Amino acid sequence: MIYKVERYIDEHGLLKQGGKVLVAISGGADSVALLVALRKLGYDCEAIHCNFHLRAEESDRDERHVVDLCASHGVELLVKHFDVAAYCARHKVSVEMACRDLRYEWFRQLMADRECSRIAVAHNSDDNVETMLLNLFRGTGIDGLAAMAVDNGEILRPLLGVTRRQIEEYLRECGVEYVVDSTNLESDYRR
């Protein structure tokens, strides 16, 4: 997987060696693999983690896992805690929209504060297909069929060239653990 990621980064001109990369990490397989792969490829990474406190102890477990992972890999970590319920009430939006708004607002703030032009997120090729199909079912036009951008000017997606199965195999080979978000096992939410 790591060679596919390296090739994908090079083909799309996503990252330059020597610069700092902010990596969004939840503790799940995709984001853990992204951080581990970028470090192995020689990128200077700083991890960022959002704790939305939506899953009680499970949210705190995810944060502890990320803290331990970053410490064991020598990666600086920034963590932000959010009050999603208050944001939902104030802005009259769904939980999913609140989390998205809060996350990307913080990402933009970090890019400015850290003088960084992009943040790497861990969407993979399976996520890209899922997004395209959701857009199709919603009645999208041609633009929606393109699904996720590799680089939208703020967010980089270096894992779009690999599948979830390849990510899990990579983590097994590396002996790196990840957490499973119980809401990913449910079909209540559109992603």
Image (cartoon, grey):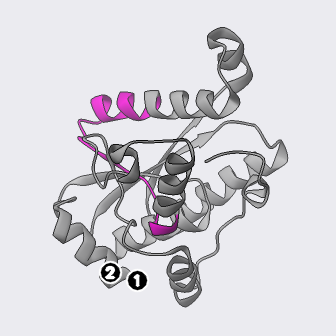
Q: Residue at x 48, y 63 (%)?
A: 129
Classify mark 1: helix, strand or loop: loop
How many marks overall? 2
- Mark sitting on residue 4: 2
Instruction: Please name the amino acid that badge 2 sits on.
Output: Lys
Q: Is residue 52 left or right of residue 167?
A: right
Q: Which residue is mark 1?
A: 1
Up/down of 23 relative to 99, above or below: below
Please state the horizontal and vertical placement of residue 4, each as a whole percent of the image: 32, 80
Q: On screen, 72 above or below 58?
A: below
Residue at 54% x, 28% y: name it: 102
Q: Position of residue 127 (x, y in %)?
A: 51, 60
Residue at image point 28% right, 65% down: 43
Q: Real-space Cα distance between discs 2 and 1?
A: 5 Å
Query: Which of 155/79 is in front?
Result: 155
> Badge 1, how many Cα within 10 Å: few under 14, some, many 20+?
some
Position of 45 with respect to 105 (left or right) is left
Secondary element under disc 2, as helix, strand or loop, is helix
Tell which of 141 and 82 is nearer to you.
141
Proximity of marks 2 and 1: CB atoms separated by less than 8 Å:
yes
Q: Which residues are magenta?
A: 106-126
